[in-house]
Amino acid sequence: MSTVSLSLNEIFDLAKKTLLANGCDEENANILSDTLMRAERDGSHSHGLFRLPAYVAALKSKKVNGKARPEVKKISPSIIKVLGNNALAPMVLKVGLPELIKLAKETGVAVLAITNSHHMAALWPETEAIAEEGLVGFACTSYMPLVAPAGAKKALFGTNPISFAWPRPGKTPVVYDMATSSMAMGDVMVAARDGKKVPLGTGINKDGKDTTDPKEIVKGSGGVLLPFAGYKGSAIAMMVELLAGALVGETFSYETAEKDNKDGGPPSGGEFILAISPEKITSSNWIKHSDEFFNKMKSMDGVRLPGERRHKNRLNLGPRNINSDLVKKIRNLSE
């Protein structure tokens, strides 16, 4: 695979130029470009520039409003709702997260229910932002049917990622962000593009047979992803459907697919975000106590805390190697 070396500023500028050329206003373009740049910076390649052509497709088809301004509504002392108004998720989060954080610090526990938003970025930016404010963060969102429930051979669930972040004042938070499928579809697509195999158990082909060929699993192949850990992952995927669908007043993955225009861009849907204040719930000893636990984990051979690799990558401010064909495609989209 040939690559092009781009600085972090060049990654941001390339994304912004492309978004401005395809229907985003300045504020939306800045927010999404920063999200894509941070994904590349942190080594989350399947959620970086790789996603940009799909965003452009959704902007061109008018499914996504690149000039949208989400609306915040306070439902109760501990619940807020953001109407996305067909905005991309980073724009929705910009207006919703500060309100969620403020509410959680006041009440101890707060929920942010997002509707009519288009989410295809990673989830760690929102939970990490919550944890950096001294709060525990949890987020989940559904997608379109790509994953077969345990025992089935047809898709019903989305990849349905969940993210959790624990605050560590003075240190980087502990953060994980994972699909409830055996592998995120973006990672399967990158593997297919780069000619790599995927582990057995990732998905099945159109004939319902196990396969290690990602091209037999990606969207449009007739194959489907499988949930991680069988029935356990399947149950968690179901939970995400309920939290990010029925609970917030949005669609389930199969309903999302029915209304989607099939342009390849992120579909319209919901997101559930929870913020919890340890200060309100427990004693002031929570920081020391949790750090003792994390130190115990790290003392074990082979163990690293979730998010450590991403935070280590973040310290490197040098250029990143980006797939050459992808850069060429994006540059064509920006003209």
Image (tube, rainbow, N blue to C red):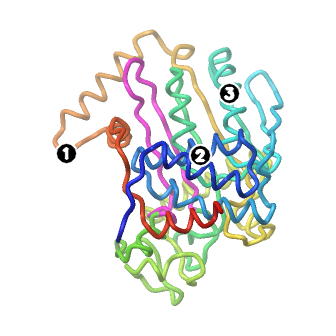
Helix, strand or loop for disc 2: helix
Q: Position of residue 294 (x, y in %)?
A: 30, 29
Q: Position of residue 141 (x, y in %)?
A: 63, 51
Q: Tell me which amino acid carries mark 1.
A: Gly
Q: Position of residue 235 (x, y in %)?
A: 55, 57
Which quarter of the picture shows residue 41? top left
Q: Tell me which amino acid carries mark 3.
A: Leu
Above or below — where is 164 with respect to 260?
A: above
Work out how far the residue at label 2 is from the one at label 1, CA to CA, in angstroms.
35 Å
Which quarter of the picture shows residue 142? bottom right
Single out the residue that lies furthest toward the left: 301
Q: Which residues are magenta?
A: 159-186
Work out how far the residue at label 3 is from the one at label 2, CA to CA, in angstroms.
23 Å
Single out the residue that lies furthest toward the top: 284
Work out how far the residue at label 1 is from the one at label 3, CA to CA, in angstroms.
36 Å
Provide the residue designation for mark 2. 33
Provide the residue designation for mark 3. 100
Helix, strand or loop for disc 3: helix
Q: Residues within 10 Å of mark 2 (few under 14, many from 20)?
A: many
**Quadrant placement of the C terminus:** bottom right
Provide the residue designation for mark 1. 302
